Image: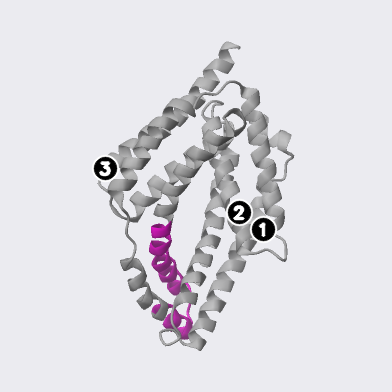
């Protein structure tokens, strides 16, 4: 193996190790609010994304095992994060409307959100203990990279997977499930590019920035789905029919704007064939 290639692989492995180190350090800190939860979740998602770059090189049983462990940790945090984000998003919606009826409807939903946030709890002791054990195993078995060629092949696969997801997500018959799948694929691709970029002198920095922005927009789409799901659970006596209709208009307006912006950004980010997208890995 050429010396330059060894150095690049070493930098990439060090980037993954660094992510584990940061997460371990974070878990030693006292949990403090929504930002803490967000940071832990992002680290877990990055490590799951790296796992997918290693998928063909790891026995399927062990790959699925570790992916399931990390997924379950992130899921427990995600459920709490969804409850927290509902209030935050609704408050932002209220600042963007001049309609008294819309403000009234939003405030009505916000009053119900207090009960939702009250149920948002995490068993930090159990989560930290389990996650630290999984990270120790991850560090030992799931980081080593053998060749640049393997990384190119795996990244190319994820790029194509993301484009396939987008075809469904931006179709006229698209459902939230399709947009959710695209969001996950975009974020996975973004985190993978982030790791590989460390070994190639930040050549992919411009495209990584676009991927991050696209992932954020699609994340806002997911938030709308979460809010709608919550509204559907509010009893009729606590949210009148007219107020539900008002909230439906607000969410649809927000959704259409997000779809417009995300589609434009997607088109500019995924305009190249896969071989050109991965060309920064040489």
Question: Which badge, 1 or 3, is on the more N-terminal residue?
Answer: 3
Q: Quadrant of residue 148?
A: top right
How far apart are the two marked residues, 1 and 2, measured between alpha carbons? 8 Å
**Contact flag, marks 1 and 3 (Cβ < 8 Å):** no
Front in this rendered view, residue 113 or 212? 113
**Contact flag, marks 1 and 2 (Cβ < 8 Å):** yes
Which residue does the numbered mark 1 point to in the structure image?
169
Q: Which residues are magenta?
A: 79-107
The disc at residue 181 is: 2
Q: Please state, as top left, top right, bottom left or bottom right, where the C terminus lies in the image.
A: top right
Instruction: Determine whether the residue tagged by mark 1 lies in a helix, strand or loop.
Output: helix
Rendered residue at 34%/67% (across/down): 117
Which residue does the numbered mark 3 point to in the structure image?
29
Front in this rendered view, residue 126 or 165? 126
Q: Give how far across and how far down residue 212 sits, in percent.
A: 54, 47
SS majority, magenta: helix
Is 90 part of what is drawn in magenta? Answer: yes
Q: Classify mark 2: residues with Cα within 10 Å, few (<14), some (14-19) or many (20+).
A: some
Q: Give how far across and how far down residue 9 sits, in percent.
A: 54, 21
């Amino acid at each position: 193996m050429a010396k330059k290639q060894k150095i690049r692989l070493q930098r990439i492995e060090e980037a993954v190790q660094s992510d584990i180190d940061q997460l371990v350090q974070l878990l030693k800190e006292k949990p403090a609010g929504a930002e803490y939860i967000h940071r832990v979740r992002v680290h877990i998602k990055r490590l799951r994304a790296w796992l997918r770059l290693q998928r063909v090189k790891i026995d399927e049983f062990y790959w699925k095992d570790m992916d399931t462990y990390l997924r379950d940790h992130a899921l427990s945090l995600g459920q709490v994060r969804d409850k927290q984000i509902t209030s935050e998003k609704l408050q932002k919606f209220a600042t963007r409307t001049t309609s008294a009826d819309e403000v009234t409807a939003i405030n009505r939903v916000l009053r119900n959100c207090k009960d939702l946030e009250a149920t948002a709890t995490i068993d930090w002791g159990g989560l930290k203990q389990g996650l630290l054990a999984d990270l120790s195993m991850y560090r030992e078995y799931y980081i080593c990279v053998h060749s640049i060629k393997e990384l190119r092949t795996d990244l190319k696969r994820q790029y194509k997977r993301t484009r396939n997801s987008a075809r469904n997500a931006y179709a006229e018959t698209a459902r939230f499930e399709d947009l959710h799948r695209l969001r996950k694929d975009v974020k996975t691709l973004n985190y993978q590019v982030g790791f590989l970029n460390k070994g190639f002198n930040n050549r992919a920095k411009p495209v990584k920035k676009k991927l991050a922005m696209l992932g954020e927009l699609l994340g806002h789409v997911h938030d709308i789905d979460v809010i709608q799901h919550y509204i559907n659970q509010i009893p009729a006596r606590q949210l009148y029919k007219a107020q539900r209709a008002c909230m439906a208009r607000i969410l649809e307006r927000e959704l259409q704007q997000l779809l417009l912006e995300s589609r434009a950004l997607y088109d500019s980010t995924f305009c190249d064939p896969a071989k050109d997208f991965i060309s920064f890995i040489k």
